[in-house]
Amino acid sequence: MPQQEVDLIVRNIKQLLTLRGGSEGPRKGPGMTDLGVIESGSVAVRGDHIAAVGTDREVSERVRIGAHTEVIDASGRVVLPGFVDPHTHPVFAGTREEEFELRLKGASYPEIAAAGGGIRSSVRQLRQASGEQLRREALPRLDRLLAHGTTTAEAKSGYGLDLANELKSLEVIAQLNRDHPVDLVPTFLGAHEVPDEYRQDREAYIRLVEEEMIPRVANGDLAEFCDIFCEQDVFDVTESRRILIAARRAGLKLKLHADELAASGGSQLAAELGAVSADHLVHTGADGIAAMAAAGVIPVLLPGTTFFLGSDHYAPAREMIAAGLPVALATDLNPGSCMTESMPMILTLACLKMGLLPSEVICAATVNAAWAVDRGAMVGSLEEGKRADLVVWKMDNYKILPYHYGVNLVDTVIKSGQVVYRDGHFPS
Ligand code: NIG
Ligand code: FE
């Protein structure tokens, strides 16, 4: 085979986690511990895709290093696929640290929401902000995602809650996707809450979402998924079904915030409608787990939210894995219930609070997370032909990743074949 010159090569990698086979589907059960580890490995990149992966020797036989090849020496380092964060709310105006303090003094998240705070307070702030202001506030959040090893993130609207402001939020997501190296998967979340002006007439708001917002979002190609907050006192199962069926008819794929604060029937609804994922699932029982397993719904777990809300009741992740569900992990980045961009922190919490192993959390944040946003054929594992999204970590074995917590051990981030973060800096 003629040797091909490559644009970039990462070599002498102490531990290369390929997650090979990740393009075939999400990993389940004991398969979640299979990371496809190569000792003394290389990844070679041409353009925006991976040209070769294997041991140093295998790759050096297949590709050629030329005068213009960028060579990164990863001696003593671990390399993983870039994280996929499959659940974030990154477009919001202002922050809610006052509510954080109220919670520390004893108020609960639902009490704050019922008093007009919570999501509705972010809605009031977002409606005042221009698209440009929203974009400027979101950019440093995307920088922090990247700096913590995330190269693809799902991004929801849901703080506009009227036609103009939901469209404004989705347009900001589209613009951020063009301007920033992190790839965004846009999700319409018009049914995140009932806004102030419809509190006396929720039926009218549901009709607005079904009849005006969903068609405009779908026709404008502004979202790939539709999500809903299916929860007691927000949207019940009957209302959620109506909205999600309208979204599916318009060609959107489905996600649900389900069983977050109480068992709401959301996991069964996700199974009934063939949703790609159901997220949170803190209160999901055996029936919901069985229904999701039968229907192939991916559970996206958000232990950072449980932690940040000060609860000790975490999602039943071990039961889900035992039932053959391909668990994925996400930050839930948002100003109310989980203010973090750090996937490594989420991995630590998933180990300590949900009993997952270091190998399982890495699988949940790469291959399974990629499938949770329908990107499994493109990202989530390091295989020839897939997008060259990879991260060099300052550690010599992957078990350090969830263990050495609360600090950032990312060395270099490569997104679509370009070095976009190195040692604390974003080269322009
Ligand atoms: O995923 N649960 C609903 N939405 C977010 C919280 C949003 C907020 O408080 O601003 C969540 O937890
Ligand atoms: Fe959320």
Image: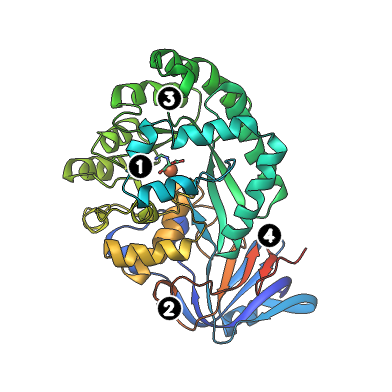
Callout 3: CB less than 8 Å from ligand 1: no
Residue 30 is situated, as x and y percent measured from the top left of the image, at 28, 65
Which part of the image, by quadrant, shows the C terminus? bottom right
Residue 395 is situated, as x and y percent measured from the top left of the image, at 50, 81
Choose mark 2 or mark 4, whichever is in front: 2
Q: CA distance from mark 3 to mark 2?
A: 43 Å
Determine which of the numbered discs, if any, sits on residue 48 in the image.
4
Q: Quadrant of residue 47?
A: bottom right
Judge whether 266 appears above or below 289 on screen: above
Question: Looking at numbered disc 1 in the image, what kind of residue is underneath it?
Answer: Tyr
Residue 2 is situated, as x and y percent measured from the top left of the image, at 71, 74
Callout 1: CB less than 8 Å from ligand 1: yes
Can you identify the residue that label 3 sits on? 194
Q: CA distance from mark 2 to mark 1?
A: 34 Å
Determine whether the residue tagged by mark 2 lies in a helix, strand or loop: helix
Question: Looking at numbered disc 3 in the image, what kind of residue is underneath it?
Answer: Val
Q: CA distance from mark 2 to mark 4?
A: 29 Å
Q: Residues within 10 Å of mark 3 (few under 14, many from 20)?
A: many
